[in-house]
Amino acid sequence: MFEAYITNTALYPLMGIEVGTTVHFPTTTQELQAALAKIRIDGKRYSEVFFTSFDSDVLGLYDHLYECENIDELNELGHALLEVRDKGGLETFEAALVLGNHTRSVKDLINLTQNLDLYRFYPDISDDEGLGRLYADELGTIDIPEHIQNYFDYEAYGRDVRINEGGVFAPGGYVSAVPEGFKEYYHGPQDIPPEHRIFAYPEKAEPVHSILAALKRFQEAPPAPKKDKAGPSHEER
């Protein structure tokens, strides 16, 4: 669902270059240990994991993930997002990220995945006029006499609806939230199921000379061709 580029910042003074590798979430203990071993994080000489960047096909997710996250919490978020995807709720989750409530931490994001029923999401609604027509004509929130329908200001009505609901136009449509009712199901790492707790240092990390050799090979290799980056559609996910 998302990936993180992790680095061992303690090696920078020694090598003069960022030493890192990519971890895909959700992951397993074995995959994580292999990644940590690559950058010589063994829990003894080097123990700090630094997140340099995040990427995801969940639009906007990386804007809410930071440099010193808890790996087990990230893994729990990955599993939660898989469940959201399987239920067809990714667009609602993405729109909720734009709305901006309950998005300040991984803990918030995990709880957000479990409260999506409190969000009203209308796909393909991108402006106030479209919102006004949706509410008036399809949802029947206002009775407009037939003889004035051609003169009714749908844009102004939609704007009033949006302001009163505190809604926003997200990339996929219009979203608003029920004012009350958000529940905190997840309180912290202690709530992570044992099968999702994957953090463990590797028994043996790669020696520095192996890392230096790998970096030399990387520097001598021709650059990979650049690809245009575009957000995938949900049909492609």
Image (cartoon, grey):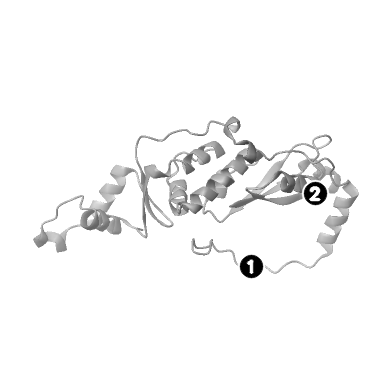
Query: Which sits earlier in the primary sequence, circle 1 or circle 2?
Result: 2
Q: Which residue is mark 1?
A: 227
Of 181 and 53, nearer the camera is 181
Residue at 28%, 51% (x, y): give it. 159
Q: Residues within 10 Å of mark 1 (few under 14, many from 20)?
A: few
| Position of residue 162 measured from the top left corner of the image (x, y, whole percent) | 31, 48
Q: Secondary structure at mark 2?
A: helix
Q: Position of residue 226 (x, y in %)?
A: 67, 67
In this rendering, would 60 be left or right of 225?
A: left
Viewport quadrant of the C terminus: bottom right
The answer to whether the residue labelled 1 contacts the one labelled 2, judged by CB atoms less than 8 Å apart, is no
Near mark 2 (Cα within 10 A), the count class, few <14, some 14-19 or many ≥20, is: many
Which residue position holds label 2? 38
Q: Amino acid at mark 1?
A: Lys
Of badges 1 and 2, the one in the foreground is 2
Residue 55 in the image: state x and y as whole percent.
61, 53
Do we see residue 51 in this rendering?
Answer: yes
Left or right of residue 175: residue 10? right
Q: Is residue 68 visible?
A: no
Q: Residue at x 25, y 55 (%)?
A: 132
Q: Is residue 9 above or below residue 22?
A: above
Q: Nearer the viewer, residue 175 or 195?
A: 195
The residue depicted at 23 percent of the width and 52 percent of the height is: 157
Q: Nearer the viewer, residue 74 or 190?
A: 190
State the CA–CA distance, disc 1 to disc 2. Answer: 26 Å
- In the depicted structure, whether residue 178 falls above or below residue 210: above
